[in-house]
Image (cartoon, rainbow, N blue to C red):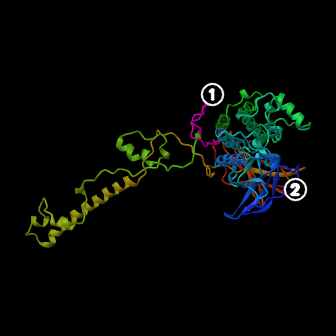
Amino acid sequence: MNQRRPPAPPPQLPGFTHLELLGSGGFADVYLYEQELPRRRVAVKVLLPERISPSAAQFTAEANVMAMLSTHPAIVTIYQAGVSSDGRPYLVMEYCPRPNLQVRYRREPFSVAEALRVGVQVAAAVETAHRAGVLHRDIKPANILVTEYNRPALTDFGIASTSQTAAETTGMSIPWSPPEVFDAAAAQGGPRTDVYQLGATIYTLLAGRSPFEVPGQRNGSAELIERIERMPLPAIERPDVPSSLFAALSRAMSKDPADRYPSAVAFARALQKVQIELAHSVTPIDILDERPLDAGPEDDDGGLTRVRGVTSIAPIDTSTRPSATTAKVAGAAPPADDATIVRGPRVVEPIADETILRPRSPQDVAAPTAAPAPEAAAPTTPERSRRWPTILAASVVGVAVIGIGAAVIGSVIAPEPEPTTAPTVIAQDPLGDGGVPLVEDGEGVIRGGNAVFTWTNPAPAEGDQYRWHRNALSGRGEGHLTTEPTVTVPVEGADQVCIDVYLVRANGTFTNEAVTICAPE
């Protein structure tokens, strides 16, 4: 949003209390209101009468389309729509209090991991819109808000395209517009136009500037359009941006629309492949559509894309997992990763009943016996002399029973020895218990407007990285990864700047606590 014109006064809306102006654009003002029931803060976008179609039916249809799209997790939620008492249509939307992506990238470039995650999530939102027949036409960092849960949320779906011509809409965001929108003879709009703007947006998050903005030179509308039409895509001067990611951005931003990815989901798959290459977590592509994906062999992703309606987490079905008991009874070989199997109870072979002495139950007393009792064998033996053999025999049998019982119990409770042929399992240790050392010799100095931090790795290993967060009284900042034991952070007027540093191994383990380094110390 910008302040190129004075905002219109906020409308009086029943059930809402105006709080403040959030911003103004070329076709709408956005205000912060408090809704009375249910009580919550909401953003209300009020369209300017001269910028919208006079047809109320058309506005209603547009609001319905936006509400349908807003069920997507990466699209701003629309709560309701209406017309104020002074005739201005308005939309009541989810309030996203965090800074939008334009504010964030101007502070500092995004990490590669976050740029990829945001790119996949927003591409999924755009693909969902395309399948509903809606083109965005104005994808840019300022139109990607951030929810309270730190998820990107694309906004301004369909509003610009219905309130203005395509040329006017894209003219508002020249730095992220494709070449064809500046050619009056070329076809305007289409899914590949949105693909270009997606690529330009991700490029901006990584580079910290729009794709064809040249530092130190004139970057007016005429200069930008000339470069967009003729200049090759400039390289991103960052060592952590892999060539595969730049290649994906270059294809998305090809001058010829036919050379771009055919769809937003195809572009999202390309970003997923970069995530796999970098060993990052793969961000799922959420597409709210019942139709099967229309992808050719070139864009086959091996099942990484999931078309879904409502996401649900199914409980683990243990009935399909082979337990140790099943393997033993069936004679099957144990699983290769035997160390990670939760075993069920073992099968214990039945023990011969005649070796156990039990107290006789009333049923045993009443039942006939197969042999006469020992007392009947020698009725003429004195009572005391008859007891000693019985006691001695009982003692011997008792000792034997105790020994057998101990062996049986030991076989039940003793752990089963692991097979010697099982492969070694190396598991990630997210709690840092794998002995990853802390960084050492941390030092921070102030140089100009920046705080420069350095440290050393006491036990370097191949693939080591460092995760660091800016630490302040307001809380820990966003995490960043670096392969070098140094980082430079803007002071931003603070008397002291502190960061927390973790050593991260290539297998995902890391130190169980951070080392805090401050400048000045």
Q: Which mark is residue 277?
A: none
Q: Can residue 239 be seen here?
A: yes
Which quadrant does the C terminus fall into? bottom right
Q: Amino acid at mark 2?
A: Gly
> What residue range appears in magenta?
277-305
Q: Residues within 10 Å of mark 1 (few under 14, many from 20)?
A: few
Please report the residue visible at 69 percent of the width from the left and 43 percent of the height from the top: 122
**Residue position marked by numbered label 1 in the rendering:** 298
Residue 383, image x, y percentages: 13, 72
Asked whether residue 72 appears in the rendered view, the answer is: no
Magenta region includes residue 294: yes
Where residue 27 sits: x, y (%)? Answer: 81, 47
**Gap between marks 2 and 1 measured at Cα:** 51 Å
Q: As rendered, which of 464 and 76 lies closer to the eye?
A: 76
Mark closer to the observer (2, 1)? 1
Can you say whether 310 is above or below 37 in the image? above
* Secondary element type, mark 2: loop
* Magenta span includes 346: no
Earlier residue among tags 2 and 1: 1
Q: Which mark is residue 493?
A: 2
**Residue sitting nearer the eye, 488 or 31:** 31
Q: Is residue 147 above or below residue 273?
A: below
Q: Is residue 213 left or right of residue 330?
A: right
Callout 2 crowding tier (Cα within 10 Å): few <14, some 14–19, many ≥20: few
251 relative position to 431: left or right: right
- Which SS type dominates the magenta stretch? loop
User: Which quadrant of the figure has residue 118?
Assistant: top right
In this view, the residue in front, 398 or 27, is: 27
